[in-house]
């Protein structure tokens, strides 16, 4: 009987159904391997020039490991005037990207051992009330769970993060927070400045302790002083 025969030449029995059945069974036993095509994760957009400025920040830290180094952000409108609304928000709710952040409670560094370990750091600290749209939007970000949180008796929440020497990661997080939490414009140009002549780490730590809750002093944001000094230098 030929391979293409549909019936047996001797008895006339159809054979095509048996062939189809056998092929179907073989296919079920050995299914085709379909290649899964995956697309790379979309890269988060960052403020133009921020990664480079943070790399400058790291370079300054390596040169002067005993000093505080802060990178600030400026927001301009279309006429190159300062956006006062955003300036106020960032003065009160977001300190600069710096190499050490301090606890509101006892004034010690939030990330123990990071103050004088001789290594560069890119840290941020956000300050929220325990209610409000900004906090809700912040909690929706993927990076939210990476932050360390402290709460004081007045209801203020302090969220801190240490990105180490990863300028790209720090830039992505800062951009996401600025745009998605505080509604900052994304099209920033020449908007970053790094203060490499800040206080010594020793002075910053002392100031933080003196203004901490544990020492019963009236709370004030240590970082705001350096922020305002940088603003005066810039404008």
Image: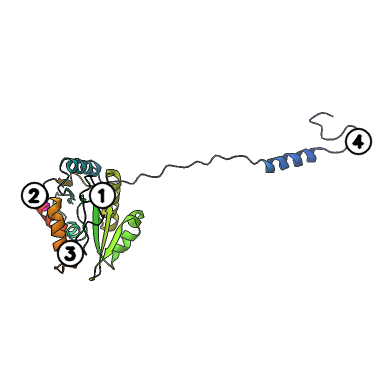
| Distance (Cα) linking label 3 and label 2 | 27 Å
- Residue at the far right: name it: 11
Are discs 1 and 3 less than 8 Å apart at CB? no
Q: Quadrant of residue 207?
A: bottom left
Task: Kindly identify which residue carries mark 3.
Answer: 212
Disc 4 designates what residue?
11
Q: Nearer the viewer, residue 10 or 173?
A: 173
Residue receiving disc 1: 186
**Front residue of 61 and 15:** 61
Q: Give the structural element (helix, strand or loop) at label 3.
A: loop
> Which residues make up the magenta segment?
230-235
Dots 4 and 1: beta carbons under 8 Å? Answer: no
- Residue depicted at 64% across the width and 41% down the height: 31
Mark 2 or 4: in front is 2
Give above or below for 12 relative to 113. above
- To which residue does mark 2 refer? 233
Report, in whole angstroms, how far the alpha carbon at label 1 lies from the one at label 3: 35 Å
Query: What is the x, y in percent for residue 190?
Result: 18, 44
């Amino acid at each position: 009987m030929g391979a293409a025969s549909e019936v047996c030449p001797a008895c006339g029995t159809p054979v095509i159904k048996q062939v189809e059945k056998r092929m179907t069974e073989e296919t079920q036993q050995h299914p085709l391997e379909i290649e899964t095509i995956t697309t790379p994760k979309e890269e988060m957009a960052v403020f133009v020039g921020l990664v480079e400025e943070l790399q400058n920040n790291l370079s300054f830290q390596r040169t002067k490991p005993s000093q505080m180094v802060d990178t600030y952000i400026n927001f301009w409108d279309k006429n190159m005037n300062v956006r006062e609304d955003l300036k106020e928000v960032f003065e009160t709710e977001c300190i600069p990207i710096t190499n050490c952040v301090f606890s509101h409670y006892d004034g010690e560094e939030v990330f123990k051992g990071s103050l004088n370990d001789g290594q560069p750091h890119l840290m941020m600290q956000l300050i929220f009330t325990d209610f409000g749209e900004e906090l809700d939007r912040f909690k929706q970000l993927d990076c939210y769970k990476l932050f360390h949180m402290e709460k004081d008796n007045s209801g203020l929440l302090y969220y801190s993060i240490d990105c180490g020497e990863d300028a790209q990661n720090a830039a992505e997080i800062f951009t996401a927070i600025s745009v998605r939490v505080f509604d900052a414009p994304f099209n920033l140009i020449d908007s970053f400045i790094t203060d490499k002549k800040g206080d010594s780490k020793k002075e910053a730590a002392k100031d933080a302790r003196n203004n901490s809750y544990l020492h019963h002093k009236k709370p004030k944001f240590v970082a705001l002083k350096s922020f305002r000094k940088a603003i005066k230098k810039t404008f």
